[in-house]
Amino acid sequence: MKIATWNINSIKARMHALTDWLNKTDPDIVCLQEIKTENEGFPYMEVEALGYNVLVHGQKSYNGVAILSKLPFEDTLTGLPGDETDQQARYAEAVVMGQRGPVRVASIYLPNGNPAPGPKYDYKLAWMKRLRTHAESLLPHEEAVVLTGDYNVIPYDQDTHDPIGWRGDAAFRPETHAQWQALLNTGYTEAFEQMDGRAGQYTFWDYQRGAWQNDHGIRIDHLLLSPQAADRITDFAIDKFVREGDKPSDHVPVIGTFDL
DNA sequence: ATGGTCGCGTAGCGA
């Protein structure tokens, strides 16, 4: 089972790129972030015609997440639990039935948090704490859980060409790293690390300053695995070629393959 | 030091 994550930076502006990539990579489940539309504006017909069931948690103009799945959804959840007043659409979760039992997948668009410090950074840290609480609550079920998405977290120095330059950024600050580590410490492992990911394997290149041309990227799109998922991963890939296409997103897809 | 680029929605924000 191929499970992918991709910050697509507007589903409407990226339908051609999505179609091309689905035909090439043929994932079973795709978690999308920054679809930038309300549910009503999502191109359900076109995506369903490509062979996918669709779960959408949209928002006007900003944010918005979705899950595409060849398998039917057994259960779904939209919105990260823990704060009823949070209006931003950044979390969707679905359960599908794999060959060995249920597989739970989440599409996460973790807040950017800049400028830091400030209220946006406070929101990011609070959101990370809520995510940790929810992620931890899933572990006692002993299911295969794959928490994927744009985490807006650069885990290590090797995940940016310029760790000094990123030092003050909300994706790289000590408080962010502490929250990231606390999330992992609940019992999840990074697919990238488990599959021997190396330095300089980026998932995002800014549109500005020739970041792509100069390979000034960062690694911020991640797959976090419960023990039952970590035991079953067989392959890991970053579809870097997608960044070379026409009108690309500034992120590229990240894919885990599982014997599930 | 500044500007540089996208998408949304049609000014300016968010990234």
Image (cartoon, coloured by chain):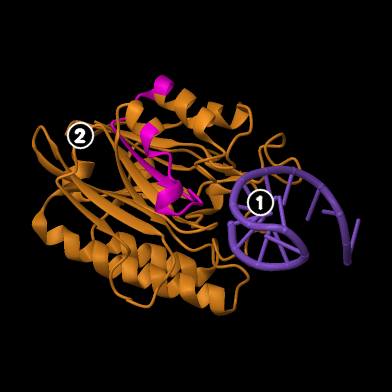
> Is A158 on the left-hand or right-hand side of A225?
right
In the rendered structure, which segment of residues is drawn in magenta? Answer: A23-45
Quarter of the figure that contains the N terminus of chain A: top left
Colour of chain A as rendered: orange
* Chain coloured purple in the rendered structure: B
State which quadrant residue A6 falls in: top left
Q: Which residue is mark 1?
A: A162
Nearest the viewer among A181 and A52 is A52
The disc at residue A87 is none
The disc at residue A71 is 2
Q: Is residue A28 magenta?
A: yes
The answer as to whether the residues below labels 2 and 1 share one chain is yes
State which quadrant residue A89 falls in: bottom left
Residue A237: percent from left, percent from top = 41, 31
- Up/down of A102 relative to A120, above or below: above
Q: Secondary structure at mark 1?
A: loop
Q: Earlier in the sequence, mark 2 or mark 1?
A: 2
Residue at x 59%, y 42% (from the top left corner)? A250
Residue at x 41%, y 47% (from the top left corner)? A222
Q: Secondary structure at mark 2?
A: loop
- Kindly identify the amino acid type of the residue bearing the numbered disc 1: Asp
- Up/down of A161 relative to A28, above or below: below
Classed neighbour count for the residue bearing mark 1: other residues with Cα under 10 Å, few (<14), some (14–19), many (≥20): few
- Up/down of A65 relative to A125, above or below: above
- Up/down of A84 relative to A162, above or below: below
Q: CA distance from mark 2 to mark 1?
A: 41 Å
Residue A205: percent from left, percent from top = 62, 43
Q: Residue furthest top?
A: A24
- Kindly identify the amino acid type of the residue bearing the numbered disc 2: Leu
